[in-house]
Structures are given as structure tokens and as C-alpha cells.
Amino acid sequence: MKIVVIQGPNLNMLGLREKNIYGPMKLEDIHAQMKAFADQNKVEIEFFQSNLEGELIDRIQESLGDADGIIINPAAYTHTSIAIRDAIAAVQLPTLEVHLSNIYQREEFRHTSLIAPVCAGQISGMGPFGYHLAMIGMTQILSEISAIKDAKAKQEK
Ligand code: DQA
């Protein structure tokens, strides 16, 4: 099982950027925690961050045939990018959307996620712990999918 973690613009600046909103933790520290969880649960994990919309779309497309699930924080593109939404819809992999801050508590332009309707779920406002929750959620989703596949294979025998 492989999970790809896709991080949008400005998330490379976590730890420096608006610490009152996003907290002091760096992206690499969040990823280290996710990697530890993945190792414990024998799940492969890969991380990708870009400030460019097209690169994020390319990585989503490349996940097809490469990964079983996607955890994505599209950052500001959450509120603007039909193209990222379409890429997620196109690959049809189970996807969880994560936001460090509670986007519904902030400026009105952040209240709309164009991404949420094509995701299995959204975690918003839990800080870095939200990524850990997404790991738990994604491993659960993937093990349910694999149990369904196993049951089908048995029936066909
Ligand atoms: C964010 C919320 C977005 O509105 C914002 O543009 C970000 C980060 C979050 O993780 O809380 O860059 O996705």
C-alpha cells in the first residue's frame, strides 16, 4: 500500500510563516511524524511539495498506478483550482484533504473548498495533528478497500 502526500504553495514555509495561524512546526517535521506512522503500519509513503499548480496536477496524475491513496493540502489552491479538483476526480483514488487551520473560521474567501466534493473527507483546524488523523483515516480506507477486493476474489473462485 502506498500513500502520496501532496503539499501546496507556501507550505514549505511552515515554521516561519504566520506562526499564530499555522504553528511552529516545520513541514519536514510533520513529514517525519507521518513517515514514522507509515513505517509502523507497513505502508509506503512519498512526499511532494510545490508552489506551482501545474506541478501539483502532474503529481496527482502520476499517482495513478503508483499510489493507492492521496493526502493533499492544496493550500490557497483549495479555494481557486478547478484544475486540481478535476485531476483528483480523474485519477479516482481515495483522497483526504487536510488544512492546518480551520478554514471556516477565517476570511470568507477561505470558506469554499473546490476540492472537498471530490474527496473522501476533509480535516480542518487540527494543526499538524490533522495529518496524523489523515494517516489513520487513509490506512482505514485502504484496508477496507482491500478487504472488499479479497472478498470479491473469494466469491469468484
Ligand atoms: C491552508 C489554508 C489555506 O486557506 C491557506 O491558503 C494555506 C494553508 C491550511 O493548511 O490551513 O496556505 O490550506
Image: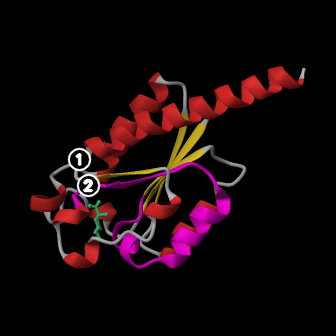
- Asked if 50 appears above or below 28 in the picture, the reply is below
Of 93 and 44, nearer the camera is 93
Tell me the kind of residue under disc 2: Leu
Any part of residue 32 in sight: no
State which image quarter holds ligand 1.
bottom left
Residue 117 coordinates in the image, percent (x, y): 48, 63
Tell me which residue sits at (74%, 23%) in the image.
Answer: 151
- Give the total of numbered labels: 2
Tag 1: amino acid: Met
- Give the percent coordinates (x, y) of residue 8: 40, 65
Tell me if residue 8 is in the magenta stretch.
no
The quarter holding residue 87 reads: bottom right
Task: Give the residue displayed 22% in from the left and 64% down from the top.
Answer: 104
The local secondary structure at tag 2 comes to: loop
Evaluate if marks 1 and 2 touch, with contact meaning CB atoms under 8 Å apart.
Answer: yes
User: For mark 2, what is the residue?
Assistant: 100
Would you name the residue on which mark 1 appears? 126
Q: Residue furthest front?
A: 155
Q: Which residue is drawn at 39% across and 38% down?
A: 34
* Labels 1 and 2: the sequence-earlier one: 2
Name which residue lies at 55% across and 76% down: 83
- Looking at the rendering, in which quadrant would you find the C terminus? top right
Is 101 contained in the magenta span? yes
Q: How crowded is mark 1: few (under 14 residues within 10 Å), some or many (20 or more)?
A: some
Question: Assess mark 2: CB under 8 A from ligand 1?
Answer: yes
* Residue span colored magenta: 73-102
Q: Under tag 1, what secondary structure?
A: loop
Image-based side of 22 in relation to 60, left or right: left
